[in-house]
Image (spheres, grey):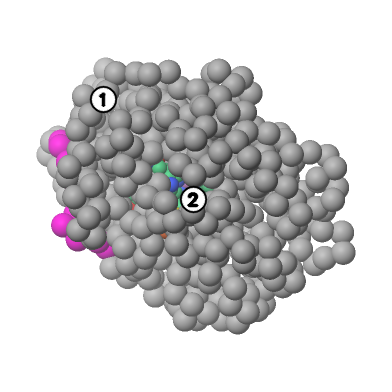
Amino acid sequence: MRTRRIHLINPKTNSFTTRPMYFNRALYSPLAGLLAVAALIPDDQYEVVLTDENIEPIDFDLKADLVGISAMTSYVNRGYEIADSFRNRNIPVIMGGVHPSFMPQEALEHADAVVVGEAELVMGKVLDDLEQGNVKGIYQADKLHPMVNMSMPRYDLLKSNRYVNKTFIQTSRGCHHACTFCAEHMMYGLRFRYRPIDEVVKEIEECGERVIALNDADFFGNAKRAAQLMRALKGRGIRWQAGVNSRGALNDELLELAAESGCYMLSIGFESISREALKSVHKYQNRPETFQALVQKIQSYGILVFGLFMFGFDEDDSSIFEETAKFNIAAGYDVCAYSVLTPYPGTLAWYEMLRQKRVVSYDWDKYDQGHIVYQPMKLTPEQLREGHMRAYKLFYSVPSIFRRFPTNSSRSKFYWSTYNLFFRKGEVTGRNIADAIAKPTEVPRHLAQPPLMPERKDWQKLVLDNNHY
Ligand code: B12
Ligand code: SF4
């Protein structure tokens, strides 16, 4: 009989991707991590209550034996406030997710315990300790999970009518690139781990949704394996999207299989139209001279192209914003997201910026890729912010939207319109330029501690030499 309750909470953030904007729906559910955690809690022993504060208020009076909070950096401060409130009510709190994984000592100032990295191999111990009334300190597995026999995420807990993209299915973890701004390789490893194809298919068949997002870091990272999985997806009547790399997406066999198995959109981290900028952040696989042909090739298979771009690289000057947006319009990208480079704590970019003493603000609320938290190299922060907004305005202007609409194409007009409407309305966080430039702050009390050290010796040295403020 279930006698106990665990309350899992995703804190609110001011991100337009997770804020309900049309028909009371948010573009994305941010709950993949918590659904995976919920799956590790035996449901004959505990009732699990799930709250996404982006779409509903938190019931602080709800009795619970444990509160679990997930946080990325941009909403960890809200996570800490929530943790403090529950602890004031004598309810123990455990935190997890990317920010607590990279800053566990900081999180322990607000929570009784922190899971560093993956929860799968440590949740059993957390629950044993909960039985003893002693959930405390850091829980970190001594190895990565092999991704075999993973529990089915608790999709039944999701208020799925509140999100456009609700079902995120992971088929692999890790990435074999090490882009400096990315947390993936220092949390999930510089190698791919794959779930068995039959287990992925089972999850897709049982998740209750026909439209899904594969949230692997790079679904085309291994062409052979991606092909096997897409063959297994054929004929199942599902529609899917995924994030892939720009080189893998040049492969016609993969694109053909993607189209045949129901792919409606591929997201690609193009990041920059400057090869020099790409090299400076170790994104060597991207070649801007191939981007336009790549967009057209993917679209020729009836698949939408979602381009992810970033501004604020050391090579970027004031010409980059307009050039990028104009390039995106001319090349016919279906959707684009523009972010400001953000040195997330514990990433290689973080250590590089600490080394150069260029981090200005340590206010985590501003680490949302819309604010500017560091001193750019060839731009003033104002130019960066203004240029960032200009790129959005150009790409999502009415003439651009009309010009890019896929009138004579089999690409999904529904998803094209949905994404363009959300992005046009959302643009970047806040419109006031001054507000977007984060003010200098005190340095944090605690240092970052990446869950995994980088494998290359020179990167290890970068981390070790610069782990101070
Ligand atoms: C898919 C994805 C998204 C999706 C959905 C995210 C989701 N979690 O459902 C969407 C599109 C919404 C998204 C948006 C953003 N994202 Co994102 N996203 C990812 C991606 C590629 C996968 C995340 C995921 O779903 N993993 C699968 C789940 C199962 O893993 P997990 O969340 O890590 O959870 C495991 C553990 O961490 C742990 N755990 C997690 N929470 C908890 C809680 C408790 C209590 C416990 C015990 C354990 C625990 O257990 C889980 C199982 O092992 C990651 C890269 C990565 N590998 O993390 C980036 C990543 C998380 N995103 C990132 C960023 C920056 C963003 C945005 C700010 C981008 C933007 N400019 O808008 C927004 C923020 C939106 C928001 N407010 O939530 C960064 C975060 C960096 C940081 N330090 O904060 C990452 C790490 C990518 C990167 N650049 O390095 N994202
Ligand atoms: S940005 Fe993409 S390609 Fe680069 S390390 Fe992260 S997941 Fe891999």
Residue position for label 1:
444
Residue position for label 2:
277
Label 2 SS: helix
* Quarter of the rendered structure image containing ligand 2: bottom left
Looking at the rendered structure, the kind of residue marked 1 is: Pro
Q: Between tags 2 and 1, which lies in front?
A: 2
Looking at the rendered structure, the kind of residue marked 2 is: Ala
Residue 154 vertical placement versus 85 (above, below):
below
Name the one closer to the observer, 81 or 256: 256
Q: Residue at x 60, y 36 (%)?
A: 318
Q: Is residue 144 magenta?
A: yes
* Magenta residue span: 135-145
Label 1 SS: loop
Left or right relative to 411: residue 311: left
- Tag shown at residue 184: none
Residue 153 location, quadrant: bottom left
Answer whether residue 191 is visible to the viewer in this image. yes
Name the one closer to the observer, 423 or 275: 275
